[in-house]
Image (cartoon, rainbow, N blue to C red):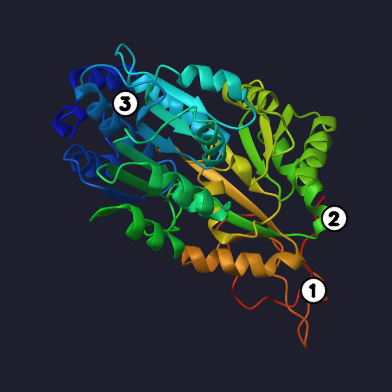
Amino acid sequence: MDFDMLGLPPRLAQNLTDLGINEPTPIQTKAIPEAMNGRDVMGLAQTGTGKTAAFGLPLLSAILRMEGRPAPKSARGLVLAPTRELAGQILDNLRAYAAGTQVRCELVVGGASLNRQEQRLAKGVDILVATPGRLIDLLERKAVRLDLTGYLVLDEADQMLDMGFIHALRKILPRLPEERQTMLFSATMPKLMTEIANSYLDNPVRIETAPPGKPADKIDQSVHFVEQTDKTGLLIDMLDKHRDESALVFARTKHGAERLMKTLDKAGFSAASIHGNKSQGQRDRALKGFRTGNLRVLVATDVAARGIDVPEVRHVYNFDLPNVPDNYVHRIGRTARAGRDGAAIAFCAPAEMGELRDIEKVMGKAIPVGGGEPWAAPRGGGAPQKRRGGGGGGNGGGGKPASRRPRRSRPRRAA
């Protein structure tokens, strides 16, 4: 099947060809026809499988069929995303798909001037891409109205729930008309998502191209068991083996990400960081440098996990395992995008064995051991500890699952 068979307007189909996008992905093949027919859609698919086009192309098609211009301060279509980076990426994609048309797309996110955003919305827009918090700011200032918004998209809805946006959604969604088309897309399906779907979608068609929580098949995963103090040395050794390839490194905290970035910079890597303490300008410059290849290593917190769409990312490092197991799936989904191969390497310190077990439970399988030995819990409970004894684990990928009973050997120390 090609995009012409999905009933897209000729201009959109031509733009996709010009962008080198010739064949729809499975989520696009299933979701676009349903959305084009006006159905509410709940789409569940792995990261990097083309969800933006799955909702963006039907949305643009509907806008192109409409006559006249949007009313002042109104938005014909609304796309909500959890992070500034993801919202910006969605806007870039929509504008590329709509090139040469009269469709006007605008972005409102935190960290930018409210007054300028208010000015851009004054004449009305066709599609508004927004983060929930900034949209509420503009609603309270009466700078935008949603009573004429006939199309709503909730992208990465699970991340919005993880980030505490459920209360923001409950403020925003009642402002939209009841007669509307709603599309919800996500890579995982937490329990609270059912409440969102039941409350705001009307008899949706559920489209699932992979079990929720399942990462892309082309990602080569491994976990290395290493002391917390040895993680930095191990990371530097691994990065040194592929200096010419892009790597994304995830840290748990803002301060930890910044500290790690500075260490990597001193070690001679072209590195930058992106986290909540960075201004929007700093985050934009870091992402631009990473996309263009001027920066080879980007250290990030989970704030960036949903907003980085760089097909050239070959390596994702979980320097710290995430507290929320679903975030692991989204982190490693930054590699092996658009059909490419990629590697995801996790570092597990003794105190992170609980997080590792939760991650493997969500994915439904164990992560192969790439180095060291699984940490064993001491008798009587408490934090996991190293086994005493000689020997060590290998560094090859595809080893035994982390959940197996560990041998009585000391894990390999990172250089």
Q: Residues within 10 Å of mark 2 (few under 14, many from 20)?
A: few
Image quadrant holding the N terminus, namely top left
Marks 3/1: CA–CA distance: 50 Å
Quarter-of-image position of residue 64: top left
Quick one: 279 or 223, which is closer to the camera?
Answer: 279
Q: Position of residue 371 (x, y in %)?
A: 68, 59
Residue holding disc 2: 229
**SS class of the residue under badge 2?**
helix
Query: Would you place residue 26 above or below residue 374 in this image?
Result: above
Residue 409 located left or right of residue 215: right
Residue at x-position 78% and y-position 36%: 261
Q: Are marks 3 and 1 in contact (CB under 8 Å)?
A: no
Residue at x-position 54% and y-position 22%: 117
Residue holding disc 1: 385
Marks 1/2: CA–CA distance: 14 Å
Query: Would you place residue 405 above or below residue 189 in this image?
Result: below
Residue 142 located left or right of residue 195: right
Q: Earlier in the sequence, mark 2 or mark 3?
A: 3
Amino acid on which the number 3 mark rests in the picture: Ile
Amino acid on which the number 1 mark rests in the picture: Gln
Residue 209 located left or right of residue 395: left
